[in-house]
Amino acid sequence: MTVMLWLLYLPFGKFFHIFQRIANVGVWFYKAAGANGPQAKCARCDAEYMSEMHRADVKAILPDLGFDYRHDQAENWQNLCPACRRKLMTLNQFQATGKEFM
């Protein structure tokens, strides 16, 4: 019973940081490998915003999780940099409300 309670408590307690730190090292290696490889460019403004490896991984896993991020202007929402995503979201909100953007 004690072991079961400890395992239930583990994700919310300080002991979880032991496993979290190990996983964090893996994230560091992933980012370092992506930084040394080719960089993904935004389909709208042509700015580099993430590694191509990371973008390909995100585009591969999201449909498996049930998310559909196809986009008419950029083929996929992941092909846009964060700044262009915000701009397009704002433009779409203006179009939905019927107001004109200055």
Image (cartoon, rainbow, N blue to C red):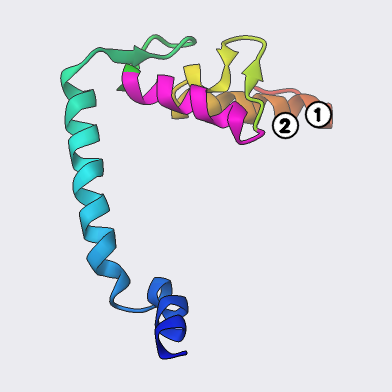
* Residue, far front: 1
Q: Residue at x 77, y 24 (%)?
A: 95
Instruction: Compare residues 69 and 19 and report the one nearer the observer.
Output: 19
Which image quadrant for residue 22?
Answer: bottom left
Question: Which kind of residue does numbered mark 1 sit on?
Answer: Ala
At label 1, counting other C-alpha atoms closer than 10 Å, the crowd grade (few under 14, some 14-19, many 20 or more) is few
Identify which residue, 48 or 67, lies in the foreground. Answer: 67
Magenta residues, start to end = 53-66
Task: Tell me: 82 left or right of 96.
Answer: left
User: SS class of the residue under badge 1?
Assistant: helix
Contact (Cβ within 8 Å) of mark 1 with mark 2 = yes
Where does the image place residue 27, in percent across and percent down from the top left? 25, 42
Query: Circle 1 is placed at which residue position?
Result: 96
Indicate yes or no whether the magenta region holds residue 65: yes
The amino acid type found where label 2 is placed reads Gln
Tell me the SS state at disc 2. helix
Evaluate whether residue 49 shows in this view. no
Q: How far apart are the two marked residues, 1 and 2, measured between alpha carbons?
A: 5 Å
Q: Does the image show residue 97?
A: yes
Give the residue at the far bottom of this rendering. 2
Q: Position of residue 77 (x, y in %)?
A: 56, 22
Residue receiving disc 2: 93
Camera-side residue of 2 and 23:
2
Where is residue 67? Give x, y as percent. 65, 32
At horizontal 64% and vertical 16% (from top left) the residue drawn is 71
In x, y percent, where is residue 36? 15, 20
- Tell me if 19 is positioned left or right of 36 in this view: right
